[in-house]
């Protein structure tokens, strides 16, 4: 089967190319990037017989419409959304055959924010620093899609769609619960701030994006004034800027930062954060991290 | 040295100062290159810290860090990059006023020091250069510019930085260079990687040499 192309019929609010991310360049200031909802990205690839690191399309809220120049197996995962082939309903969360020239439409998310659309063979744009991901913070990788863009497809791996599969989804969450492993800079905050983090009523701010989930809610009080010397940041870091409102770092977040990180949300929970719409209540459950310092370790 | 927990699989080495942080960063890179460091996905230096991000064996590396030491790198041990600069930045007069000297003296002070890349951030290839002493502190601009041209040489705190591409920015601009800081065709893409020594050469001087 010859390689084909995908034409973007309707780009949607924000549709980007994503894979597992850009690793190994954080010391040069290059963010991780990659699919915000990694399990959904991996599932979409599995459903069309791709390896997990094949590039998919990540949509935001309003979906996308595309046409392929060759027959291709596609799958839509992540936020539940109506799927159509040339106007006829097709399955969400399943492999779908898209004939050459037919239009695949992914509608507005029923709930959640981001859908993942995989094509057998994957989006085959040239990788930049080992990844095809669009990084909205630093501008690396392909630009967000525009109507009329043409994207190359890769050669299908030959694995084919799995014969048995069952894509489940929970109903829309009533709140986003985020465990937070305290540290590295929880000692920059008062004991009351940690209680506020645990008991405060937070909600997802409409200013959230691929860089960070911003939160509305009570301010976390600092015990240490002054500036923190810039230090390395990780995905899931809960950074607290001077206004005291915590910010949860997502895939396109900067690699270093100068505001203290009270704790870190495990990466496995970031996919839920990636699907949390503005206004959704957020509850943090702070947990003491193992304190490595002061622990006697025999050689 | 304090070892601070970062999430499930990472560790922040908190050190007393930039010199110690640079020494530990160099030591950890050396150990990675010689295969004596447990696999770590990213080693990210900060001003006074080194982040070990995605560590294969966290208890093991904790024990080893407490045993290891990091010799200070010799003054002339790393590559020296010379950056030609035309010192005509929009904030040169502001910096001269702050330091209580003429613009020519600002150029002499700035180009007279040797710098070292302490860490990167803000944008790919944006290096935070240390080497300027305490008296030469510069605050960030109260109103950041919406667009700073690529190649702008700028100051904030005691740091010098060079904008790798046009972007918003709040640092005080003292000059510009035509050197390409970030080039995806280059390996590594960043001209200034942590540990690199840097000197700024006033462009008129360069032309005369």
Image (cartoon, grey):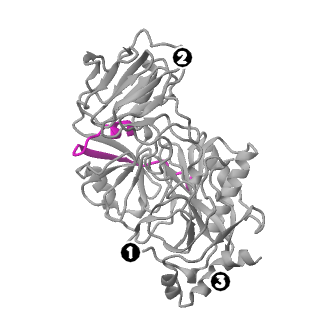
Residue at x-position 47% and y-position 53% = A254
Front-lying residue, A78 or B185: B185
Label 1 marks which chain's residue?
Answer: B
Q: Are marks 2 and 3 on the same chain?
A: no
> Helix or strand or loop: what does disc 3 sit on?
helix
Q: Quadrant of residue B182?
A: bottom right
Front-lying residue, A254 or A48: A48
Q: Position of residue B1 (x, y in %)?
A: 60, 61
Q: Nearer the viewer, mark 2 or mark 3?
A: 2
Residue at x-position 49% and y-position 25% = A153
Q: Position of residue B29 (x, y in %)?
A: 69, 51
The residue wearing badge 2 is: A2
How packed is label 2: few (under 14 Cα within 10 Å), some, or many (20 or more)? few
Q: Position of residue A252 (x, y in %)?
A: 44, 47
Q: Is residue A249 visible?
A: yes
How packed is label 1: few (under 14 Cα within 10 Å), some, or many (20 or more)? few
Range of residues picked out in magenta: A269-295
**Cα distance, mark 1 to mark 2?**
57 Å
The residue wearing badge 3 is: B108
Cβ atoms at labels 1 and 2 below 8 Å apart: no
Label 2 marks which chain's residue?
Answer: A
């Amino acid at each position: 089967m010859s390689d084909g192309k995908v034409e973007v019929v309707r780009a949607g609010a924000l549709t980007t190319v994503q894979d597992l991310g850009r690793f190994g360049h954080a010391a040069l200031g290059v963010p991780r990037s990659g699919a915000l909802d990694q399990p959904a990205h991996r599932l979409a690839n599995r459903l069309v017989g791709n390896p997990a690191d094949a590039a998919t399309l990540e949509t935001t809220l309003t979906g996308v419409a595309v046409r392929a120049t060759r027959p291709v197996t596609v799958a839509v995962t992540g936020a539940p959304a109506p799927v159509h082939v040339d106007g006829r309903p097709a399955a969400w969360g399943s492999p779908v055959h898209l004939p050459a020239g037919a239009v695949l439409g992914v509608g507005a998310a029923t709930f959640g924010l981001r859908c993942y659309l995989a094509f057998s063979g994957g989006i085959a744009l040239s990788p930049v620093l080992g990844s095809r991901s669009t990084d909205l913070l630093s501008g690396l990788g392909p630009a967000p899609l525009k109507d009329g863009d043409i994207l190359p497809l890769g050669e299908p791996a030959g694995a084919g769609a799995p014969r048995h599969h069952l894509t489940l989804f929970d109903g829309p969450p009533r709140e986003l619960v985020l465990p937070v492993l305290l540290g590295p800079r929880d000692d920059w905050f008062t004991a009351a701030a940690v209680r506020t983090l645990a008991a405060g009523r937070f909600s997802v701010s409409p200013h959230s994006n691929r860089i960070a989930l911003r939160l509305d809610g009570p301010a976390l009080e600092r015990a240490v004034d002054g500036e923190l010397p810039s230090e390395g940041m990780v995905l899931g870091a809960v950074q607290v800027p001077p206004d005291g409102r915590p910010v949860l770092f997502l895939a396109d977040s900067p690699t270093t930062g100068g505001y203290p990180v009270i704790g870190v949300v495990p990466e496995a929970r970031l996919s839920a954060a990636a699907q949390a719409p503005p206004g959704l209540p957020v509850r943090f459950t702070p947990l003491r991290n193992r304190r490595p310092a002061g622990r006697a370790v025999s050689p | 040295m304090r070892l601070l927990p970062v999430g499930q699989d990472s560790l922040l080495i908190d050190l007393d100062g930039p010199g110690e942080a640079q020494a530990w960063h160099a030591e950890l890179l050396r150990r990675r290159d010689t295969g004596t460091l447990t696999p770590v996905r990213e080693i990210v230096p900060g001003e006074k810290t080194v982040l070990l991000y995605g560590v294969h064996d966290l208890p093991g590396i904790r024990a080893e860090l407490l045993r290891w030491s990091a010799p200070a790198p010799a003054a002339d041990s790393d590559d020296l990059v010379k950056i030609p600069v035309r010192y005509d930045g929009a904030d040169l007069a502001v910096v001269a006023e702050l330091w209580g000297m003429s613009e020519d003296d600002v150029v002499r002070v700035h180009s007279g020091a040797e710098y070292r890349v302490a860490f990167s951030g803000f944008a790919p290839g944006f290096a935070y250069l240390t080497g300027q002493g305490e008296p030469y502190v510069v605050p960030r601009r109260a109103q950041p510019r919406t667009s700073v041209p690529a190649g702008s040489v700028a100051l904030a705190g005691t740091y010098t930085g060079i904008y790798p591409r046009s972007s918003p920015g709040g640092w005080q601009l003292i000059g510009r260079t035509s050197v390409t800081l970030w080039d995806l065709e280059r390996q590594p893409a960043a001209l200034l990687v942590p540990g690199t020594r840097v000197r700024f050469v006033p462009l008129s001087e360069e032309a005369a040499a």
